[in-house]
Image (cartoon, rainbow, N blue to C red):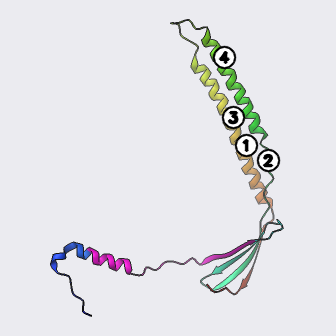
Amino acid sequence: MEWTIPSKDCGAAGVLLACSVVVLFSASPRAQPRFEAIGVDSIANGSGLQVMTVRDSVRNVCYTTFVMRPEEPPELPPTAIAQAATIRDHRLAELGAAFEKASVGQIPGLPGPNALAYQWEAEKALNTFALTVVDEAIDRLLNELRHSLAGPKLVVAGVETCPAR
């Protein structure tokens, strides 16, 4: 088989096509990760014990690990948010009624009630509720963090032969 060089009349498009074919069909090496989890199982009795098989591609060996994880933290009751929502709704209803009452006896041509004062009080009620929600979320995160730090942790590993890929 004989290869010929394209003539000058194919120009830059031919060179571009030839370069594209070379780049497209050239093999590009890809990095393989050293460790690969090939199996994860949980023990069904709810003890938090997991069995994980990890392949080490450099040493061509597998490790079976037994990991004890703490149970889920106890759920905190959401009473603070419900109570704060009730207080917020009551305060907003009071402000709305007070503004309506001040607006009803309005004489045309005279300035009405100061809407900014009512808006300010409404924003305070909304911000108080938002702070309560944030405090509750922080309490939940701290509870989970304390539980995860206090729980037992155990990792045991053993070497075994790897199954074929």
Q: Closer to the N terminus: mark 3 or mark 1?
A: 3
Crowd tier of the residue under label 3, counting other residues whose Cα lies within 10 Å: few below 14, some 14–19, many 20 or above: many
Residue appearing at x 79%, y 50% in the figure: 75
Give the residue number, with chain letter if any, for mark 2.
76
User: Which residue type carries mark 4?
Assistant: Ala
Coordinates of residue 6 in the picture (x, y in percent):
20, 82
Judge depth for marks 1 and 4 and give the one in front.
4
Position of the N terminus, as image quadrant, is: bottom left
CA distance separating discs 2 and 3: 18 Å
Give the residue number, with chain letter if any, for mark 1.
136
Q: Closer to the N terminus: mark 2 or mark 1?
A: 2
Give the residue number, with chain letter if any, for mark 3.
129
CA distance separating discs 1 and 4: 31 Å
Give the residue number, with chain letter if any, for mark 4.
98
Task: Tell me, yes or no, whether the highlighted magenta stretch contains residue 27.
Answer: yes
Q: Closer to the N terminus: mark 4 or mark 2?
A: 2
Q: Closer to the N terminus: mark 2 or mark 3?
A: 2
Residue numbers of the magenta segment? 16-41
